[in-house]
Amino acid sequence: MRPIICRPSPSAELVERFGDIDPLHARLYAMRGLTSADELDYALAQMIPVSALENIDEAARLVIENRDERIIVVGDFDVDGATSTALMLRCLKDFGFRDVEYLVPNRFDYGYGLTPEIVDVAAKRSPALLITVDNGVSSVAGVARANELGIPVLVTDHHLPGRELPAAAVILNPNLEGSKFPSRNLAGVGVAFYLLARIGRMLDDQGLAGASRIPARYLDLVALGTVADVVPLDHNNRILVQQGLTRMRAGMAVPGIEALLRQSGRSLTRCVSSDLGFAVGPRINAAGRLEDISVGIECLLTDDVDAAAGYAHQLDQINKDRRDIEATMREQAFNYVDKLGEQNWPDCVCVYDRSWHQGVVGLIAARVRERCNRPVFAFAREDEQVLKGSGRSIQGVHIRDLLEAVSTTSPGLIVKFGGHAMAAGLTIAAPALDEFKKSVARQMRRLYPGADFSGAILIDGPLPGSAINLEFARSLRDAGPWGSQFPEPLWSGEFTVVEQRTVGENHLKLRVRPVAGGNPVDAIAFNQAGPVFRGVVHLAYKLDVNEFRGVENPQLMVEQIAPLRDRPA
């Protein structure tokens, strides 16, 4: 059972700074690091100025200079890459660019990023300019190959750079060393949006009336990519996400996003960030994991409603296949760590099986991390000699820095790597797996001797029974956008179990009543079926709105359930 820790309570003075905002909401915001109501202003005018991003004028001029030439956008095979690619193509075509295409490497044939091999594929189309989106800052060899062929490259990326930068014509990345851009948390699609906003302004100044307003039409794409890539939702990212959600709710989403929301049973008029992260995003990601992300990109590019519905259905089917594959791999991974025993878990857990699908190892790393509360790397075979790995981290451990330390202290052990603080990818030689396990555990102990492996659940405190109602649930839903490092409120309390049953494959459906007083309420605990709870239980939960057949009711989304007065039967 994971320990539960309450967030530090803010001072009354800090809560008062939020003015007329409901005190309970003000308390929630203060507990997430906000200091005034100004940080809740999500008007587009509050966005960090486009001009603040270094190299943006040079990047915009390079693109405009090639408006009458062929431009190829080279994307990545996840949701951030797909939305970045769709955003770039839609805007450039709306700007009147003559010839814009996209190319995304299939992960199984070419691997990640602008590799020399993918440059050779692009070169057959005779482009005048290559633009990378959500990749490129680590593509030293690929950019060198493009330079050999006389093709300039504009890199737009948000990943952390390595020791050597590619010799691109321009690199646009808020995480470059020395950058003074106030938010380093932009997703790849956020960087692309900034570039396109600058291009639109320049074209407007050159006489193309209305060009500066074009990128904002596609803020739904920016919101989707930002949420799905799990980048921290600082104020700037919350502006981008909220603006995109507003467009979706107003019926102005691209047909593909609308179709994917419908396909997943989510409401377009009431969609929230979690709908993007847990319903739309996984369906697009599944295509990149199992097949070809171009299905997802085409879904986001089409303006034909029927075509969008067809793509959404296709993506849903691929996602079902992904879930089946993941379930088998997850069971194998859990068996491995359970047999190892909690007392024998290393500081960084590594799991591998010859049969695993390399497109799904990132999900397995995330599931094992949830079970072990440690950084995890999951590996699959690329071929007999090479393993592809994906890592997921815990709070306080920068997983890309961890790989950097392994690479520095054990030169040649890692073939290549890249990523963020919480997620990273790498390639190693198959015979090097055991040495990697030892080295990464060694570096964990050296760099993070005080790492917290408890998996503590951070809550916002108890919620009065009188507040567990539909009105307050709606207010919490609308108080976001919630997401990474700006988490949805999580509460705890004691409840009497009134009813209990298992639904689906492994989900626990409950009817509970607050012990402190209040009306009975429905609750759902995903993937927690098994024990039968009687009497009083302690819940860690989110308060949500459940809609069924047009009727809304409050519902508890249970993170953890623990018996208090009766043991599970």
Image (tube, rainbow, N blue to C red):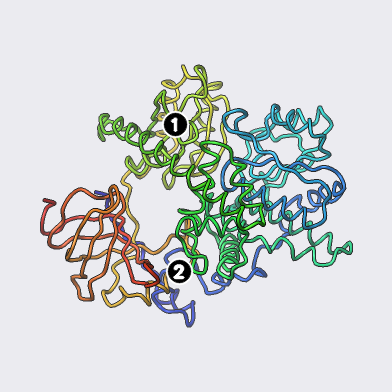
Residue 547 spot, x, y in % from top left: 38, 68
**Secondary structure of residue under mark 2:** helix
Q: Is residue 221 left or right of residue 63?
A: left
Q: Which residue position is annotated with label 2? A: 29
The one of 303 and 60 positioned closer to us in this rendering: 303
Q: Which residue position is annotated with label 1? A: 443
Residue lying furthest front: 306
The one of 489 and 330 positioned closer to us in this rendering: 330
Q: In this view, does 332 lie to the left or right of 30?
A: left
Q: Residue at x 54, y 41 (%)?
A: 287
Mark sitting on residue 197: none
Residue 35 spot, x, y in % from top left: 50, 70
Residue 140 spot, x, y in % from top left: 70, 31
User: Based on the displayed image, in which of its 4 quarters is residue 183 positioned?
Assistant: bottom right
Q: In this view, does 538 lie to the left or right of 546?
A: left
Of badges 2 and 1, the one in the foreground is 2
The one of 560 and 346 positioned closer to us in this rendering: 560
Q: Which residue is drawn at 38% across and 69% down?
A: 549
Q: How crowded is mark 2: few (under 14 residues within 10 Å), some or many (20 or more)?
A: many
Numbered marks: total: 2
Q: What residue type is labelled 2?
A: Tyr
Q: Residue at x 42, y 38 (%)?
A: 365
Q: What residue type is labelled 1?
A: Gln
First-in-chain label (2 vs 1) = 2
Q: Residues within 10 Å of mark 1 (few under 14, many from 20)?
A: many
**Mark 2 vs mark 1, CA separation in Å:** 36 Å
Q: Residue at x 23, y 76 (%)?
A: 518
Residue 262 spot, x, y in % from top left: 50, 59
Above or below: residue 203 compared with residue 437: below
Above or below: residue 236 compared with residue 161: below
User: Based on the displayed image, in which of its 4 quarters is residue 226 positioned?
Assistant: bottom right
